[in-house]
Image (cartoon, rainbow, N blue to C red):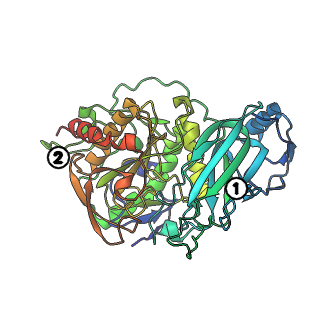
Amino acid sequence: MRALLVTSVGVTCAAALTLPLAAPASSAPVLSAASARPPSLTTEPGTDTTDTSGTSRTTAPDTITSPDGAELRAAKSAAAPAGSTQSLPLAPLAVPSNRVAGAPAVQGLPQRDARPFSLVGVVWDDAEAELHGTVQVRTRATGTTRWSDWQDVETHNADHAADLGSAEREGRTVRGATAPLWVGDSDGVEVRVRPESPAAPESQDRAATPVPLPEGMRLELVDPGEDPAPEPARGAPANRAAVPAVFADTPPTAALPEVLTAEIAAASAVNAEVAEIGASVIPALTQAETAESVNLAPGAKPYIGPRPRIVTRKGWGADEKLRERNFGYTKSVKAAFVHHSATGNNYTCKQAPSVLRSIYRYHVKSSGWRDFGYNFAVDKCGNIYEGRAGGVTKAVLGAHTLGFNTNTMGIAVLGSYGSTNPPAAAVTAVSKLTAWKLGLFGANPKGKVTLVSGGSNKYKKGVKVKMNVISGHRDGFATECPGARLYKKLGTARTSSAKLQGR
C-alpha cells in the first residue's frame, strides 16, 4: 500500500510554485522524502544518555560542571540553542516498609541535578507494552531551591501512535511512552513510577498476580531550545489573496492523471524547503478570498470555511533535521480527531512554540516517531499551528489516533482538559480549522463518516465504524483523551464549523 517517493533535486522551486500543491499525492498512503539542592553532577551539551550514577555519554566534546543555575542557563543558551534531550534510566527505589509482598518495586530517580529542561516524559522499550501504574514527577525551577509539588504524568499507553503494520510503526524503533508534561524551565528532577496494586485474590488459596512495569524505562528531559528570531517587519500586501502559491492552498477539485500526481508529490519536498525559508505565518483569508483561492468552476458554491491564520513549522521553530525527510500521505481527509496534548495547563501562549518544539522532540527522539504526531495544534489563546510536515492543505498521514490515522487529521489542543474547561478561544479555533480543512475535502462537520479500523483496543482491525466527522480521540480508542471537559465541547465545535462552511 505504501511506496517510497524520492525527492527529485531536478524539481525547481519555480515548479513547486506553479503546481496545484493541494492535490493528494496518490490514491494510497505514500511515504515521500523544596529541599536543599542535591550534589551537582557533570553534564554535557547536546542530546545524551545519562545513567543513574550521573555519567553522561555523548558525542559532544565539551563537558560542563554547573553548580549553579546561572551557569546552567548559560550552557542552555550557548551550547544547545536547537534543543536537546537527556535520557535517564530508571531504577528500583528504596523498598517502603508497607510494600505488599510480591508487588513489583517502585522505580524512579531520587532528587538530582540536570541540565535545564522544560518537558518530561517516561519511555520504555516495547511500544505495545502498557504501563499499569502511576507516574509522578517533581521538578526544581532553574537557579532556585524551589521544588514543585508532585505532578501526575498521563500514562498514555500507546493510544497516540502510528497504526500497526504501517511503515512508520514497522520501519522504526518505536517506544512506549507516557504523555509529555510541560514543567517550565527546570534544572532538577525527581520521579517515581508506582506499579498498579495487585488485584484482590478471588479466593484465599489463589494469590493475586502482580502487574510488572515495562522494561527499559527511562526518564526523558527535553530542552526545547531557543525561540526562532522574529522576522523583519514587512509591508502588508496590496492583495491578501495574492500570496505565493506555496501558501495559496489550492485543494484538489478532481482526480488528476497519475503523471501529474507524481510530479506534485515530488514537488512537495521542494515546497517544504520553500516554506522553510518563507513566511512564518500563513495569513487568514476571508470567505471570498478562500473561495477564489481554490479555483472553483464558475457558479460553484462549495462548503469551505474561510482559511484561518496558521503559524507554520518555521514560525514555531521546528528543527527540520529531526524528522524523516520524506512525507506520508493518504487519499483524503474524511474526519478530524480532537485531542488534548495532556502536557498540563501551566504554559503561557508566548511559550506555546516552546511546548510544540518539546513535544516534537519527544515524539521523534524519545518515542521514535518519524515526525510530530498531530497534523495541527491549537493553544489556549486560539492560535493554530502547523503540525506534521507535508503541507497544510494535503492529506498528511499522522500518528495521532491508533487505528484511525488513515484519511483523517489530528488536532491537539495544548493542555489537559479532564477537569479544566478548555478556553473558548481554543474551541473556536478548532471550529475554524475544521471548517476550512474538512471543507477542502468536501466533509460536513455535522455529518457522519464510516472509517475502517487499522486495529486498536476498541475496534479490531478491519471493522467498519460510523463516527462523527469531528470526533474525539476516545471515539476511536479507549482513552480519556481529549479530556471530559473538551469532549463535551465538540458538539459546539461541530455546529460552529458547519456554520462557517455555510451549511
The crowd level at tag 1 (other Cα within 10 Å; few <14, some 14-19, many 20+) is few
Residue 320 shows in this picture: no
Count of residue discs: 2
On screen, residue 347 versus residue 451, left or right, reads right
**Residue visible at 68% across and 41% down?**
138
- The disc placed on residue 248 is none
Percent x, y for residue 469?
27, 51
Percent x, y for residue 10?
50, 59
Q: Is 428 or 88 nearer to us in this picture?
A: 88
**Residue visible at 34% across and 55% down?**
475
Dot 2 or dot 1: first in sequence order is 1
Percent x, y for residue 52?
80, 56
- The disc placed on residue 98 is 1
Q: Identify the element where label 2 is drawn.
A: loop
- From the viewer's perspective, is residue 473 above or below residue 217? above
Residue denoted by label 2: 297
Percent x, y for residue 87?
71, 54
On screen, residue 399 versus residue 28, left or right, reads right
Q: Identify the element where label 1 is drawn.
A: loop
Q: What amino acid is found at the position of numbered circle 1 in the picture?
A: Asn
Q: What amino acid is found at the position of numbered circle 2 in the picture?
A: Ala
Residue 171 falls in image quadrant: bottom right
Mark 2 or mark 1, whichever is nearer to me? 1
Residue situated furthest bottom in the rendering: 205
Residue 428 shows in this picture: yes
- The span from disc 2 to disc 1 (Cα, nearest Å) is 74 Å
Q: Is 298 or 405 nearer to us in this picture?
A: 405
- From the viewer's perspective, is residue 193 above or below residue 347? below
